[in-house]
Amino acid sequence: MTHGISEVVERGMCVGCGSCAVRTSGAIPVTIGRLGVYEASLAGATSGQIAIASKVCPFSDDAKNETVLGDERYPDLDHDTRVGRYLDIFAGRVTDDARVLGSSSGGLTSFLLEELLRDGHVDGVVHVGRGENSELFEYVVSTTVEELASSRKSAYYSTTIADAVSQIRGDGRRYAVVGIPCFIKAFRLIADQMPDLETQFTFYVGLVCGHLKSQFFAESLGWQADVPPDSLARMDFRRKNPNRSSSDYDYEVESHAGERRVRPTSSAVDGKWGYGAFQPEACNFCDDIFAEAADVAFADAWLPEYMDDWRGMNVVVTRDRVVQGIFEAGTARAEIEVERLGVEDAADSQGGNFRHRRVGLAVRLADDIRAGLSVPSKRVEPGYAGVTRRRRALIRQRRAMSRLSLERFDVARRASDISLYIRPMKRAIVQYRVLDALSRGVLSTIRRLLKPLGTKRSV
């Protein structure tokens, strides 16, 4: 049976990208759901509208996969199953330390987008920025370098492209579109089906993603800093700290009353990315790490030789020669510094990501098939081959923790009592850490891991 958009929505694996809303001119609405994630509603759509929407849904079997999209766009480039097609791979950052300080990583994403605007390659950029209404973040359209600068840094928050793309459609201007892998795929699929937007989407800029976060993540971090959800006005997910490594950053929250709080992300119960807190179900079915359908992909350089430097560094995979030329010109002007990397280096920088999206995906697919559930066709073979029993238990626990975090935080919000989320989450994390130790064969650490969580930094 084909796993189309109907099955995607029914299984709760809609990522809320909004491609279906764009393709059907709003006949399929995408709105924020109970668990803080955008989701599509097919209730009022005709069978014909559902059929055309299924061709642009990034988790539908009716849509082209990332390999096909990459092969169509970059047929002359080398290919690797981990990073997709590639022209060049390097690590780098901008040389201006002030600009690096205002970036989540090495500042090269902002550098490229600003150069695309300055050089006249695009008239605007469609990207996630500060929200103007009730949302902390949303897709916005920037047409100046100043507008871009006001929305730098990572935003771990559920958003949709629907309104922003509807805003620019047919205006005759060219845009760079920015997004995590599934959103880049959605942009590509829309362009494939809608010639008017194909001419407008000029550059595709991908952001390597460990997993998307529900809007609850921002609220949870704020609440743990004594700023409850209804008081949260602003969030900076990544503030660099010169006394710690690049991966050990802070976050800052601001209340509507103007009170600001800064805390280490590691101090939050759900601050460790590996716990999968507030991860939507869609992320359990993604196999694209380096945004294979994008002209360029940016990642954090989580490599030993770079992580001790608090300023941060990007890993960059280029696939477009105009983009490559912009980086070469920036290097010649000493505005950026780069070091060439190989495919193995790029893959190593995202080791946990590959374990989740390749090894973990194989297990999750096999589990769901065994349970008689519909699953999308992925480039990973379902099964348990080479995955130990303990590792499978760890993979399943992480998936359960994602569901638990979403459900329990919803309960906590309704009751205005964060402990209704914190207590069960801490118990689940203890179980996860024991399973992690067992899967690695580190039995001697179990007693330490069983100590109460957060004895130094927790809420």
Image (tube, rainbow, N blue to C red):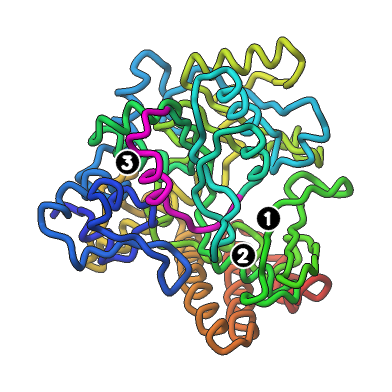
| Neighbourhood count class around disc 2 (C-alpha, 10 Å): few under 14, some 14–19, many 20 upward | many
Where in the figure is residue 208, as x and y percent of width and height? Answer: 53, 41
Are the residues tagged 3 and 1 within 8 Å (C-beta)? no
**Disc on the earlier residue, 3 or 1:** 1
- Left or right for 382, reference 387: left
- Residue at 79 percent of width and 25 percent of height: 95
The circle drawn on residue 151 is none
Q: Is residue 174 above or below residue 252?
A: above
Residue mark closest to the camera, 3 vs 1: 1
Quarter of the image for residue 437 reads: bottom right
Write the start and end of the magenta stretch as one range: 155-173
Q: Look at label 3 and name its amino acid.
A: Arg
What amino acid type is highlighted by mark number 1? Phe
Q: Name the residue under label 1.
A: 237
Observer-nearest of 207 and 77: 207
Residue 302 in view of the camera: yes
Numbered badge on residue 218: 2
- Give yes or no for contact between labels 2 and 1 (Cβ–Cβ under 8 Å): yes
User: Which residue is depicted at the point 49% across and 67% down?
Assistant: 402
Report the amino acid beneath label 2.
Answer: Ala
Q: How far apart are marks 2 and 3 (CA)?
A: 32 Å
